[in-house]
Image (tube, rainbow, N blue to C red):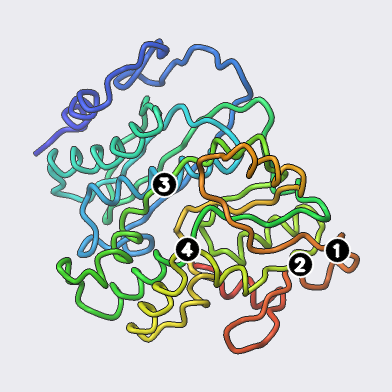
């Protein structure tokens, strides 16, 4: 039977102590040299059979996905991710190799963004639970409350792939050799995160798409006290829209509904002034960013819609529907 110390020792080998860390894995707490900017902190928890199923996901994918969610939250504040604290509750009989695979999944994401795992905790549970706290730094955060009248709404890609993958997993037998399945399924099991850092200096507001495009952009509208219009013609012009819609149809899904309401893509959506958008284009910023709507004005009636959007059945979404259509984490 493996002991807690054996698990900790195995993790310490996978996550060596970075030079700026005074105390790392193995002591009561990590000690970090003082950050030069403001500290940003975020946390996400993943629970077996709520956020993932082990008959679908490998330990590597589980680790990678929860690391992606945490680092995306740091990026969504306009910040640089620096450190992760990883806590796991392990079912009885978990082997060291299982924990190593989970850790390597986390490392596969953290290494891409020069983010270090510096500590955490291990406990036992009937089901696997992974909780990560992410720490980052920022001089001036980008908030949900920064959207201004006249801003363009921009997005970093086409959402909905993760939701389509989840639908495939729930309703059919996954087949890794089927190219129609492999893309969406992988997008759900191990979404690929792209840093939006080169956009930070241009944006007025920002959030990551974890609960669904409409749900997350409504958070910006609510926090900024503005009305936002998402334009279906612009959304249908996003790269990959036609391919995605046809693929969704193969599995009996409405592509636009998945795009608007599917979650866990971990793309980014925000708002940008007209002048900054023209500057962004002129300076040829490398990240892909696409206009999908407009901030039309201040919200005069707090009981009215913050998002004007037509759902696939042609009915205007109200506040109650926005909440119910968002991706459900529990």
Rendered location of residue 161, percent (x, y): 40, 66
Rendered location of residue 55, percent (x, y): 20, 64
Query: Which residue is at the far front?
Result: 282
Rendered location of residue 138, percent (x, y): 61, 28
In this rendering, position of residue 5 left or right of residue 135: left
Residue shown at 22% from the left, 49% from the top:
59
In the image shown, does 40 or 143 lie closer to the viewer?
A: 143
Q: Quadrant of residue 243?
A: bottom left
Q: Which residue is mark 4?
A: 239
Residue shown at 38% from the left, 43% from the top:
67
CA distance for labels 4 and 2: 26 Å
Q: Which residue is mark 2?
A: 306
Question: Within 10 Å of the Cα at label 2, are there few (<14), some (14-19), or many (20+) other Cα atoms?
Answer: many
Query: Which residue is at the far right?
Result: 300
CA distance for labels 3 and 1: 33 Å
User: Nearer the N terminus, badge 1 or badge 2?
Assistant: 1
User: Nearer the N terminus, badge 3 or badge 1?
Assistant: 3
């Amino acid at each position: 039977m493996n002991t807690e110390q054996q698990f900790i020792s195995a993790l310490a080998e996978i996550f060596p102590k970075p030079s700026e860390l005074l105390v790392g894995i193995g002591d009561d707490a990590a000690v970090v040299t003082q950050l030069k900017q403001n500290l940003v902190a975020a946390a996400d928890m993943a629970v077996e059979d709520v956020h993932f199923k082990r008959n679908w996901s490998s330990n590597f994918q589980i680790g990678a996905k929860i690391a992606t969610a945490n680092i995306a939250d740091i990026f969504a504040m306009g910040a640089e991710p620096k450190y992760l604290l990883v806590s796991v509750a392990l079912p009885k009989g978990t082997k060291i190799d299982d924990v190593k695979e989970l850790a390597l999944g986390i490392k596969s994401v953290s290494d891409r963004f020069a983010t270090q795992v510096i500590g955490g905790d291990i406990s036992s549970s009937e089901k696997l639970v992974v909780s990560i706290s992410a720490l980052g730094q920022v001089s001036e955060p980008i908030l949900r409350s920064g959207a201004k009248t006249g801003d363009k709404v921009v997005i970093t890609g086409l959402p909905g792939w993760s939701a389509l993958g989840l639908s495939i997993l729930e309703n059919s037998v996954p087949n890794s050799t089927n190219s129609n399945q492999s893309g969406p399924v992988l997008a759900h099991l191990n979404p690929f995160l792209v840093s939006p850092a080169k956009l930070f200096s241009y944006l007025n507001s920002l959030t990551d798409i974890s609960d669904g495009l409409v749900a997350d952009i409504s958070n910006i509208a609510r926090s900024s006290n503005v009305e936002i219009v998402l334009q279906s013609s612009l959304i249908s012009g996003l790269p990959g829209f036609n391919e995605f819609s046809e693929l969704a149809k193969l599995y009996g899904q409405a592509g636009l509904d998945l795009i608007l309401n599917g979650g866990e893509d971990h793309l980014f959506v925000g708002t940008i002034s007209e002048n900054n958008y023209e500057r962004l284009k002129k300076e040829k910023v490398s990240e892909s960013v696409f206009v999908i709507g407009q901030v039309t004005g201040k919200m005069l009636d707090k009981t009215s819609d913050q998002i004007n959007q037509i759902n696939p059945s042609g009915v205007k979404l109200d506040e109650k529907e926005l909440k119910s259509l968002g991706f459900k984490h529990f």
